[in-house]
Amino acid sequence: MAFSLTSLQLPSPVLREHTGPLTRRLLREAGGRGLGQVPVAVKPEIVVTSVCGFCSTGCGLSVHLRDSQAVNLSADGAYPVNLGMACPKGWESLAPLAAADRATVPLLRDRTAGTTTPLTWHAAAEHFSRRFKAVQAAHGADSVAFISTGQICSEEMALLGAFAKFGMGVVHGDGNTRQCMATAVTAYKQSFGFDAPPATYADFEESDVIVFIGANPCIAHPIMWQRVMASRREPEVIVIDPRRTETALAATWHVPLQPKSDLALFYGLARILITQGWLDHNYVALHTNGFEDFAEFLEPFTPEATAAATGLPVEEIHRLAAALKPGRRVSFWWTMGVNQGHEATRTAQAIINLALMGGHIGKPGTGANSITGQCNAMGSRLFSNTTNLFCGRDFANPSHRAEVAGLLEIPESAIPDQPSLAYDQIIDGIETGKIRGLWVIATNPAHSWIQQGRMRELLAKLDFLVVQDMYHTTETAQLADLVLPAAGWGEKEGTFVNSERRIGRTRQVSRAPGQALSDFRIFRLLADAWGCGPLLRQWTDPEAVFRLLQRLSAGRPCDITGIAGYDMLDRCGGVQWPWAGTGEPESERRLFSGGKFFHADGRARFIFDAPRPVPEPVDAEFPLVLLTGRGTSAQWHTQTRTGKSEILRRLHPPDLYVEVHPADAARLGLAPHSAALVASRRGSLRARVVVSPGVQPGSVFLPMHYEATNGLTLWAVDPHSRQPSYKHCAVNLSPAT
Ligand code: SF4
């Protein structure tokens, strides 16, 4: 691909749209070289494509290299995902690599003295091995656990899963994907027989009706939103969300239901579809099970009862049901507003049920489609070997263990025969003394987990805490006994899997600072120190591991044996799973086109449960509902990386703010931009008041990127997926003195 000066000079339409005049001025001042990058005095010679390392959209970025070192980047115009667009985070991908607080050397902390001492890698690996082995010797193999991430490459997370589970004998390991995608995983497994998001992004452009539920792609997945905007079908865009988000403002129809009334709404819609006969009877009869029981269950969800539960007028509920009738191409897309709820799995399945009833699945412009969060959450779902054995297998299934042992040429006895505790159960295990040692990789639970105060207290109780991260300054790294310095995106090789199941390549385009190593090399080093070299002799480098993953996928729904190596990923602009064919596949493929699902009988299931009350209803003392979520397209999760970019920092308010409805603000005497105290039963914080009709009376909204937010949230999880509920707890609000 030739170097193009034009591609550097012109920011994408998305950047223009989402960054405003300040960034455009900065771009001009940057002399057309992009933002936050070094000046390009000499024409770079090589441009390579690397998939972005922030969100699950999986945009291709053209990285401009001189002397094998990135000097700039632009959005890849040829990559099928983003078609030349990138959001501010993508454009600023190189800036976090140059941060002053990069972890550059292993650090050992003395908790008593409050000091840290640099170690060699040899000493760090020896210390890691000695301390965790001592914990296991004293308290059992299952007293050590790990928390992984959706931010590292599939090959790295697979090696971690193999080393920890098969080599260290660790039974319990989970990922931060528990916080974003566990609900979709559980819902798909139960409904379809395998964790299989069906969509391809072309479905955004092929739909007549696009229903976003608890999703705000304008800022959370801006390139997906651009693809909606690119549709020539002029779709009806319906946003079901208690907040009038940026996406709701841009949609053709915002459905402002009461917080956490979505499950009741979907049952009410399903009942209307049945009573009106707005069903694809043929599809239901041929491709599903359980419809009759579902129809009977729906009886109490009359339009009037649904209106009472949701706060929506009966007429609007009818009109919404009519929009979902067979005959038009209807696609449903959900994300954290659904996944992060106390009855999230059943809510996701209620969406799936609506898609099945209308036959809205397996055809262009349809589907019950979860949008993933992190760049490689989808890779984690298949390849992390944490709560599932590789490629959607089950640790408790003897034939699955035998199969994996044979494929990896390891003793079957090395594979744990019990499933892992989930993330929240691992943390609960610290309180009971069951978990005594914890290894945290590329995630920041001391900031991001619910009920932050309790999380921090429990992390401090551990006998030994290891944090492996790019930065030694994260809230979690500052609690660690041992910090292992890791390379970040752009400093290592491997693959990510995006929301449409596309496996794309991410590359090393920059040298990691100091002694920081790729996560892959760290895992290898630690495995050798542990004595696992022979067990992991095939796991030599990322591409060798990719071939192992292909072998493990053979015959599974995620079969990728047809991918002829990394070169094919480059040539094809990524490849969606499954691909077991010969030659190169079509660029965009969706699942279930033949109406055949992954249950043994080939049929999807209607799954349902009665709605349950929220875990912490509002009351006289805490009369407001707290909603949390993404703040802007310039922020990513705990701001560990995006906070390092001066440009991105200028694109959002520096201090925490709380969105309050004008009526509540007036009642409480809160002026715009004044300081307020927001308190829950677990803590309080100070925030600047943003008076906004975007939140409903009785609700307030806090962005999740600021450290204090999770000091308020409630320790509550969905019982099926064990995903935390970030979207509802009770708070009060008052002027700060
Ligand atoms: Fe694309 Fe997401 Fe990266 Fe933005 S953060 S450039 S939307 S992959």
Image (tube, grey):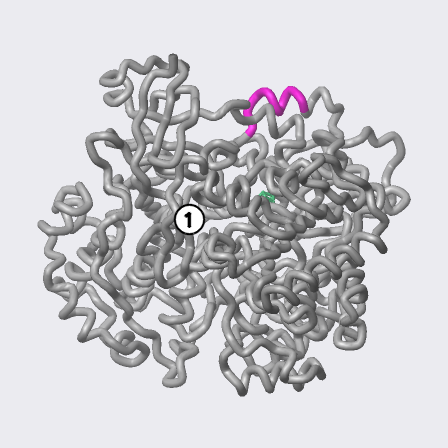
x, y percent for residue 644: 67, 32
Q: Is residue 344 left or right of residue 104?
A: left
x, y percent for residue 27: 68, 25
- Res. 574 visible in picture: no
- Res. 497 visible in picture: yes
Q: Main secondary structure of the magenta part?
A: helix
x, y percent for residue 261: 24, 48
Residue at image mark 1: 336
Task: State which quarter of the image contains the C terminus.
Answer: top left
Q: Foreground residue, 213 or 166?
A: 166
Q: Foreground residue, 630 or 408?
A: 408
Q: Foreground residue, 128 or 593?
A: 128
Highlighted range, magenta: 19-26
Q: Within 8 Å: ligand 1 and the Cβ of disc 1?
A: no
The amino acid at mark 1 is Met
Q: Determine the quadrant in which ligand 1 lies.
A: top right
Q: Is residue 548 magenta?
A: no
Residue for point 72% across, 46% down: 483
Residue for point 33% across, 44% down: 239
x, y percent for residue 123: 83, 53
SS at mark 1 in the image: helix
Q: Foreground residue, 461 or 221?
A: 461
Residue for point 54% across, 64% down: 381
Report the number of discs.
1
Answer above or below: position of 712 versus 367.
above
Q: Quadrant of residue 67?
A: top right
Circle 1: is it few (<14), some (14-19), or many (20+) Cα within 10 Å? many
Q: Is residue 58 left or right of residue 729?
A: right
